[in-house]
Amino acid sequence: MGRPRTYDPGAVVEAARDLFWERGYEVTSVGDLEERTGLDRSSLYQAFGSKRNLFDAALRCYVEQQTEPMLSGMRQAGAGLEAVAGFFAARAQAFRDDPERTARGCLMINTIAEFGIRDPAVARAAAAHRERLHHAFTTALSRAAARREVDAGHVATRAGLLLSAAMGVFLAARTDTGVAADICEQIAAEVSSWRRP
C-alpha cells in the first residue's frame, strides 16, 4: 500500500503557475519547481508525469483563477458599455496598485509569445483564450447595443479591436506597467465615448 499524499496538489499547481508566470516555461527548470513547490523531482513526476503536464495544469489554473474572474463583469446579465470600460479601468488600477506582480503580464499571452504556433497544444489554448476574451467583449457590447447604448453596426469591429488591445496591454505591462496603465485608461475613455447621445 502506497503512502498517502502529504501535500495539497492544488497548492503545488498554484506555486508552479506563479513560477511559470514569472519566468516562462523554457527557463523554468525542474530544480526551480522543486524549490518553489517544496516537492522533490520524484514526487513531482509521480504526481504530474512531466514538467509539461504540470505546466498544462498551471495554465488551466490560471484561466480558472485569473482570467475567468477578470471577465466575469462583462458576462453578467446587466453588463453593457460600462462593464467594458470597467474592464480596462480595473486593469489600469491593478497595474498601478501592484506593479511588481502585474509586470508579469498575462500567463496565457506570455505562453503564446514564448511558443508561437510551434506547439499544437499551445495553439489550441491560444485560440481558446482569444475566443474567451472576444466572446466577453462581444457579449457586453451586444447587450449595450440591444439597450441602444451603442451602434449595433459596430459591435463586431469594436470587439475585435478590444481583443487586440487587451492582449497588447498585457505585453506592454512586461516592459512598463505605468505605460500599460495609461493605455488602459485611454481605452476605457474611448469605450465610454462610444455611448450614443
Image (cartoon, rainbow, N blue to C red):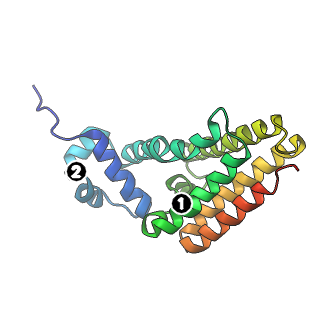
Q: The residue under label 1 is which amino acid type?
A: Glu
Residue 147 in sight here: yes
Relative to 26, 32 lies left or right:
left
Which part of the image, by quadrant, shows the N terminus? top left
Relative to 183, 159 lies left or right:
right
- Residues 108 and 184: in front is 184
Residue 76 x, y percent position in the rendering = 62, 35
- Residues 15 and 27: in front is 15
- The residue labelled by disc 1 is 114
> At 66% from the left edge and 41% from the top edge, which residue is drawn?
136
Relative to 37, 195 lies left or right:
right
- The residue labelled by disc 2 is 41
Report which quarter residue 26 is drawn in: bottom left
Residue at the farthest front position: 197
- If you read the primary sequence from the N terminus, does the residue marked by circle 1 or circle 2 appear first? 2
Residue 162: which disc?
Answer: none
Q: The residue under label 2 is which amino acid type?
A: Arg
- Residues 27 and 159: in front is 159
Q: Is residue 196 above or below residue 103?
A: above
> At 27% from the left edge and 39% from the top edge, which residue is drawn?
9
Kind of element beneath mark 2: helix
The reply to whether the C-beta atoms of the residues labelled 1 and 2 are less than 8 Å apart is no
> At 56% from the left edge and 43% from the top edge, which residue is drawn?
125
